[in-house]
Image (cartoon, rainbow, N blue to C red):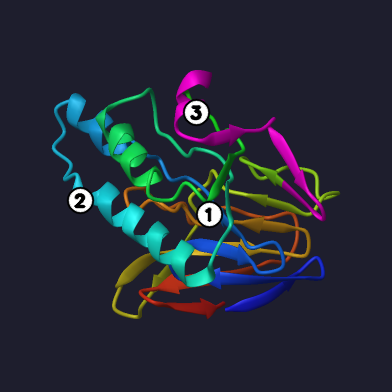
Amino acid sequence: MEIIFNNEQIVLSPHRAAFWPRKKILFLADMHLGKTSYFRSKGIQIPSSVMSDDLARLTFLIDKYKAESIVVAGDMFHHNYNSDINIFKQWRETKTDVRFVLVPGNHDKLLGIDYDNLGIMVTEEEYILDPFTIIHQPPKSVEQFSISGHIHPGYLMEGRARQSLRLPCFIINERQMILPAFSGFTGLYTKFQTSGPCVNYVIGRDTIFKI
């Protein structure tokens, strides 16, 4: 689905990313790479296919949009360096022509040398890509046009017979775009309130619904 955000065309993808055609940039948030390995180290058996599926979606997005840069609005990684990161490193070697920029989030704890070895540029807590400010946590101030993540936004759909379904979504108002968590291995928060009226772009399989 195409929208206009701060006079710029942005394409919202049901694969949990947003594409800026003029700059050939993909915006993602909350990839949480390494989360499955981290949970397995704590004795919780999580299939490694979760991360493989996420990387397959990312490959699809890069190829579909011919993206030249990936800008991650925080929590690209889940914890310290672990075996999952080696899988990402192998994948990264197949996409050396794509620039990776990480606006750090609260989970990004890798060492500087690790980011360098993975070919990832790490910015300050706010990263200006005129006319947007990229930041991990949605800012309280609405003075800037921001693109953020962090809250793993979801939309709760309820039926008459007490059925309910939580779906990932984009939350967008006049000055703020909150991206869905890119990882399929995350919870969904359905109660986030923006400072003004907003639109939910809800992801249902391969479709986006405007609510």
Measure how far apart labels 3 and 1 are at the Cα level: 34 Å
Residue 129: percent from left, percent from top: 76, 49
Judging by the rendered image, the residue that carries numbered circle 1 is 191
Measure how far apart labels 2 and 3 are at the Cα level: 23 Å
Measuring 53% from the left and 29% from the top, which residue is drawn there?
106
**Identity, as a three-letter code, of the amino acid under mark 1:** Lys
Quadrant holding the N terminus: bottom right
Is residue 126 found inside the magenta-colored segment of the image?
yes
Left or right: residue 195 compared with residue 38: right
Res 118 → quadrant: top left
Res 203 → quadrant: bottom left
Q: Badge 3 local density, few (<14 within 10 Å), some, or many (20+)?
A: some
Judging by the rendered image, the residue that carries numbered circle 2 is 49
Vertical order, 136 against 188 (above or below): above
Vertical order, 96 against 40 (above or below): below
Measuring 49% from the left and 77% from the top, which residue is drawn there?
208
The span picked out in magenta is 112-133
Residue 12: percent from left, percent from top: 56, 70
Left or right: residue 60 compared with residue 146: left
